[in-house]
Amino acid sequence: MIIDGRAIAEDMYEALAKRRALFERPIKLGIIVGGPSPVIESFVRIKTRAAAKLNIEMIRVDLPGDADTASAVEAVKRLAVDVDAVIVQLPLPKTLDTNAVLAAIPLEKDVDALNPTVPEDKHPVFAPVALAVIEMLKRAHVTIEGKKAVVIGAGRLVGAPSAVLLKRLGARVSMFTLKEGSVEDLKDADIVVCGAGNPGLIKAEQIKEGVALIDAGASESKGRVVGDADPACAEKASFISPVPGGVGPVAVAMIFRNLFDLLEKVGS
């Protein structure tokens, strides 16, 4: 079964539109973009369209090619003054200190829950991609509690928060990265969450029959956005999310759910 992220997102937007109507004022969402790439532009387009659907103004700031960390931090701080929430679109150029840039996002405006100076349990919202992973598993009626889950990749957007959330929901979680875990762990995993950003990394022979596979490892290959799972994995998985059209649209919807949660928390 292919889990249709676009259909899930559309269902979520119906509820989000009702929440948006409760805020009788303009809402602005700012986004900092550090460099052009097909993957980055794909996510920015999705977020921009979603914002328009919810009558939210998206304000985009593109960092110049020669931007240093100090100027990027200042750009985040300036933008934060004028908007209700701020997204720093990752990845940023390697010349920038990503942690320093993310740390400039005010906690009450951090819809991605990425400010690294704040303990995980102190963020008022949770990482949208991890929320999307759980939403898709639940909608596919996949039991999480007591199941073995393997998370591939330990990045701040997908792997790390997904592992935390799966553990909170009772899964037995192990991680597989270049430095940790083993590909052998995949053979008896009930749930696999891909977040390495390595095209075709996971092969069908590495997973067991009937696994629930959520592929959030979007990356560029030959000008296309592709996932971590080889297409042949679909023949063995009971549930699999496509790339594109899987986790991405749901994660974007979660951004706006987080936005409304934050606005309600600060009484706006």
Image: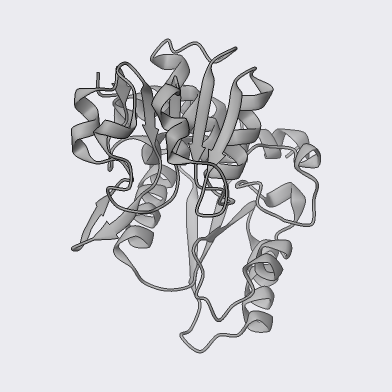
Looking at the image, residue 211 sits to the left or right of residue 236; the answer is: right
Q: Examine the rendered structure and indicate whether residue 112 appears above or below residue 242.
A: below
Looking at the image, residue 70 sits to the left or right of residue 58; the answer is: right
Looking at the image, residue 223 sits to the left or right of residue 112; the answer is: left
Quarter of the C terminus within the rendering:
top right
x and y, in percent, of residue 225 in the image: 26, 53
User: In the image, what residue occupies the spot 51% across and 89% down?
Assistant: 66
Q: Examine the rendered structure and indicate whether residue 10 appears above or below residue 112.
A: above
User: In the image, what residue occupies the spot 70% across and 64% down?
Assistant: 81
Based on the displayed image, in which of its 4 quarters is residue 5 positioned?
top left
Q: Examine the rendered structure and indicate whether residue 150 appears above or below residue 143.
A: below
Q: Examine the rendered structure and indicate whether residue 266 appears above or below residue 233.
A: below
Can you see residue 246? yes
x and y, in percent, of residue 43 in the image: 38, 53
Based on the displayed image, in which of its 4 quarters is residue 97 positioned?
bottom right
Looking at the image, residue 77 sits to the left or right of residue 245; the answer is: right
x and y, in percent, of residue 83 in the image: 63, 57
Quarter of the N terminus within the rendering:
top left
How many marks the image carries: the answer is 0
x and y, in percent, of residue 242 in the image: 27, 35
User: In the image, what residue occupies the spot 76% across and 51% down?
Assistant: 107
- Which residue is nearer to you in this view: 1 or 189? 189
Q: Residue furthest bottom?
A: 66
Can you see residue 256? no
Q: Which color scheme does this rendered protein use?
A: one colour
User: In the image, what residue occupies the spot 66% across and 46% down?
Assistant: 113
- Which residue is nearer to you in this view: 243 or 201? 201
